[in-house]
Image: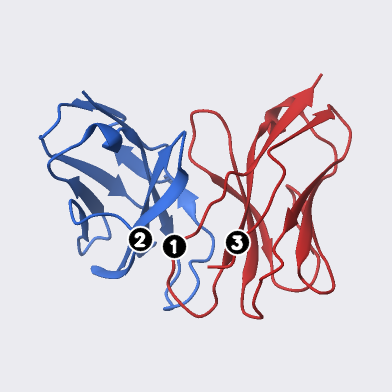
Chain colours: A red, B blue
Amino acid sequence: DAKTTQPNSMESNEEEPVHLPCNHSTISGTDYIHWYRQLPSQGPEYVIHGLTSNVNNRMASLAIAEDRKSSTLILHRATLRDAAVYYCILTSGGGADGLTFGKGTHLIIQP
Amino acid sequence: KAGVTQTPRYLIKTRGQQVTLSCSPISGHRSVSWYQQTPGQGLQFLFEYFSETQRNKGNFPGRFSGRQFSNSRSEMNVSTLELGDSALYLCASSLASQAHGLGKLFFGSGTQLSVL
């Protein structure tokens, strides 16, 4: 499975934008980039996913580099409820593999 | 629409015992996958079922098994429990109907298993 690299932790202030980076230099052409987040005492929650083009939804935006070797999850205006562990994951388009979660980025939001 | 339901929420067992965990997926979802989460190893994939068939399996010993029923509900069984099996076991369901890609997963809150 292609692997991803994320910073262990990041800190941001409430109501400011947050950019969470993810490196995936060995990504293949059929791999989708998914982001999930896990709040304390809960299961992971889907945030967004994309293949080549940038994506937006009500939760966040996903910016994908032109060479697809990196991506950035953007929270436009962080709130205290966004404090969670964020996982960047690649899913293969060619097999029914389970998601391979790395350690993720622990996002801390300061009031 | 009800979310993914896992029962029980908490479980305490002793070494050598066996345990069965249950997962009810979101209505209409036919894919169910299971994950183990520990502080040291993070989230690790156990297996995935679709239409009562195991489609893929992670790197876990044979003591870990599962099954899926015709109503898509799934159970996971761990036999001969070891201390290291203490973990949060998460179930996720998906609409994925193809042999590739799991699509968007919806996770339950998990079953916290403690092995003493």
Q: Are marks 1 and 2 in contact (CB under 8 Å)?
A: yes
Q: Nearer the viewer, residue B93 or A40?
A: A40
Q: Chain of mark 1?
A: A
User: Which residue type does callout 3 highlight?
Assistant: Lys
Whether residue B43 can be seen here: yes
- Name the disc covering residue A3, or none: 3
Q: Chain of mark 2?
A: B
- Name the disc covering residue B58, or none: 2
Q: Residues within 10 Å of mark 3 (few under 14, many from 20)?
A: some
- Name the disc covering residue B7, or none: none
Asked if A21 appears above or below A111 in the picture, the reply is below
Residue hosting label 1 = A98
Asked if A95 appears above or below B2 in the picture, the reply is below
Q: Are marks 1 and 3 in contact (CB under 8 Å)?
A: no
Q: Chain of mark 3?
A: A
Q: Earlier in the sequence, mark 1 or mark 3?
A: 3
Q: Residue at x 24, y 60 (%)?
A: B71
Viewed as shown, does residue A77 lie left or right of B94?
A: right
Q: Position of residue A70 (x, y in %)?
A: 77, 62
